[in-house]
Image (tube, rainbow, N blue to C red):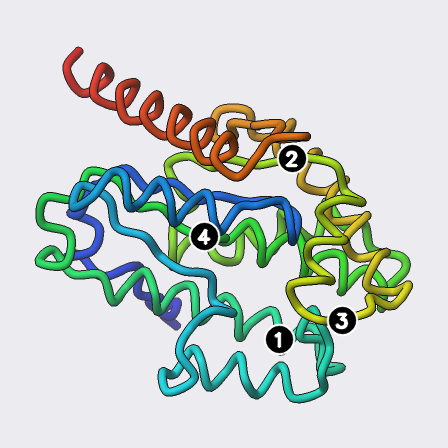
Amino acid sequence: MMAPIVPGPRAAICRVRPLWVSVEGLNGVGKSEAIRTVAAELGPRCMRLSELTDKDGDTLPGQVITALASTGDVFLRAGHPVVETLAFLALKVREYERLSKGDLTGVEVILEDRGVDSTAIYQAVILAAQHPGLQPMALAERILATMAPWRPTPDATVLLTGDREVATSRFAARTGRVLANRDLVVIEQAEVLYRDIALTHPERFTVLDVSGYSRAESAKALRGAVEDLIQRREAVHAS
């Protein structure tokens, strides 16, 4: 019996090669605002992909996120973490495949607010809480491996780090929530896992410590990192 043929990413998408940079970090670290600022400064040469949870409710991703948020859980935990993980992965694949060559004309860099690493890290922490015998790092790597045939990991990932308590306070204020202890545990474990993933994949990760930075300073640091990544890529192509 012939093995089933599993399709990979669409060929048209594979030919599109702007530099794909995902920006990661704990909730409240200042990631999204820095991305918006840098994308605006770079202008047409940059395409910004907003975080899944910021998608318009009239879109398919927005409808999925709304359904997952129906329980009121700040991390979209609806009680079925495997299904939720697959849903997030499917949305990230859809996002990738919907980009056409026309969409990216003149685009040098894609700035993605939370990429596949966020799904891997947060869902690994949530899954491990329900299955104590499983290690979050192993789960995160497995989630990334599951995604790989359908959507490659980004060319580069910039991880913003900072004071966790400050970031958590900002996150709670922004959402108008009083975070429960189990929410704080997720944030604490995600911080550890982000660090471990970055150490395991130094060829892809750039870590920026923005502790004590103003919003403008965080954006400046991110832009510097992105410009450096663009220049390094251009140097490789020119060699």
Please say if 32 is above or below 78.
above
Q: Secondary structure at mark 4?
A: strand
* Earlier sequence position, callout 1 versus callout 3: 1
Name which residue lies at 14% across and 58% down.
103
Q: Which residue is mark 1?
A: 84
Question: The C terminus appears in which quarter of the rendering?
Answer: top left
User: Where is residue 184, by image quadrant?
Assistant: bottom right
Q: Nearer the viewer, mark 3 or mark 4?
A: 3
User: Where is residue 181, by image quadrant?
Assistant: bottom right
Please say if 133 is above or below 90.
above
Name which residue lies at 31% across and 45% down.
39
How far apart marks 2 and 1 lie (CA) works out to 26 Å
Amino acid, disc 2:
Thr
* Earlier sequence position, callout 2 versus callout 4: 4
Label pair 3/4, CB-CB below 8 angstroms: no
Q: Which residue is mark 3?
A: 177
Q: Residues within 10 Å of mark 2 (few under 14, many from 20)?
A: many
Label pair 2/4, CB-CB below 8 angstroms: no
Q: Which residue is mark 2?
A: 161
Q: Position of residue 179 (x, y in %)?
A: 82, 66
Amino acid, disc 4:
Asp
How far apart marks 2 and 4 lie (CA) works out to 15 Å
Please say if 161 is above or below 140.
above
- The count of marks equals 4
* Earlier sequence position, callout 3 versus callout 4: 4
Q: Nearer the viewer, mark 4 or mark 1?
A: 4
Name which residue lies at 71% across and 57% down.
124
Q: Residues within 10 Å of mark 3 (few under 14, many from 20)?
A: few
Label pair 2/3, CB-CB below 8 angstroms: no
Q: Nearer the viewer, mark 2 or mark 1?
A: 2
Residue 54's disc is none
